[in-house]
Image (tube, rainbow, N blue to C red):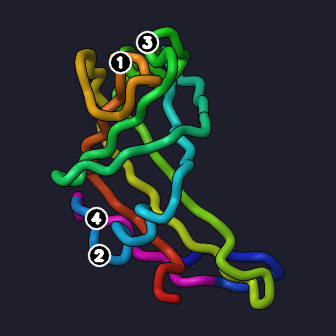
C-alpha cells in the first residue's frame, strides 16, 4: 500500500495485516506523542473523529481517557458500534516533505472504575484492542 504525499510524492506505507501488537518502532514513536484522533461511528453509520489523549498498555491495548468520558458522543458511539480507529501522526520534515504515523484499528470497550490515568480523568475510559496496526514513515 502506498500513500501519496504533497506534490504527488509517494511514501511507503506498512501493509495492513492481522498484526495486532505494536513493534518497537511504533512503540517508540507513540511514546513520544501525546495526541491522536479517535474515529467512531454512531448507530446510524455517521462517523465522528475527535482529538484524544491516549495511554499505551503493556498488553498492546490502548486506553482513552477524558474529563467526562461517560457523557461524550464517542462514548455513546462505542455503545452502538465498537469498531474504532486511532490515528497518531505528525510531520517529521517539511523539506523534504515527510509524514509519519501509526493507525490502530480495533474494537473498543467501555471500562468504568478506578484506573491510573490520573485523578483529573473521569472513571470511564475507552479501551481499544487492536485487530490491525498500520504505520508509515517511522524509518527516519
Determine contact: label 4, label 2, CB under 8 Å: no
| Residue 95, x across and y down, in percent | 80, 88
Main structural element of the magenta stretch: helix, strand or loop?
A: loop
SS at mark 2 in the image: helix
Q: Which residue is tagged 2? A: 24
Q: Residue at x 35, y 29 (%)?
A: 126
Looking at the picture, does residue 71 appear above or below residue 32? above
| Residue 26, x across and y down, in percent | 37, 70
SS at mark 4 in the image: loop
Q: Which residue is tagged 3? A: 70
> Label 4, label 2: how many angstroms apart (C-alpha)?
7 Å
| Residue 7, x across and y down, in percent | 83, 81
Q: Work out whether mark 4 precedes mark 3 in sequence or the reverse, and give the earlier one.
A: 4
Residues in magenta, as a range: 11-20
Q: Name the image quarter holding residue 128.
A: top left
Determine contact: label 1, label 3, CB under 8 Å: yes
Q: Work out whether mark 1 precedes mark 4 in sequence or the reverse, and give the earlier one.
A: 4
> Label 1, label 3: how many angstroms apart (C-alpha)?
6 Å
Res. 107 mark = none
Q: How would you rate the neighbour count of disc 2 (Cα within 10 Å): few for under 14, some for 14-19, many for 20 or more?
A: few
SS at mark 3 in the image: helix
Q: Which residue is tagged 4? A: 22
Q: Name the image quarter holding residue 85.
A: top left
| Residue 48, x across and y down, in percent | 60, 30
Amino acid at each position: 500500500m502506498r500513500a501519496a504525499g504533497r506534490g504527488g510524492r509517494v511514501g511507503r506505507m506498512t501493509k495492513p495485516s492481522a498484526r495486532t501488537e505494536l513493534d518497537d518502532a511504533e512503540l517508540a514513536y507513540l511514546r513520544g506523542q501525546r495526541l491522536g484522533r479517535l474515529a467512531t461511528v454512531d448507530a446510524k453509520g455517521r462517523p465522528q473523529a475527535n482529538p484524544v489523549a491516549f495511554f499505551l498498555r503493556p498488553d498492546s491495548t490502548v486506553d482513552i481517557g477524558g474529563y467526562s468520558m461517560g457523557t461524550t458522543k464517542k462514548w455513546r458511539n462505542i455503545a452502538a458500534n465498537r469498531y474504532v480507529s486511532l490515528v497518531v501522526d505528525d510531520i517529521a520534515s517539511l523539506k523534504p516533505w515527510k509524514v509519519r504515523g501509526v493507525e490502530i484499528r480495533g474494537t473498543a470497550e467501555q471500562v468504568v472504575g478506578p484506573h491510573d490515568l490520573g485523578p483529573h480523568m473521569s472513571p470511564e475510559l475507552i479501551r481499544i484492542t487492536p485487530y490491525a496496526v498500520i504505520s508509515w514513515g517511522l524509518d527516519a
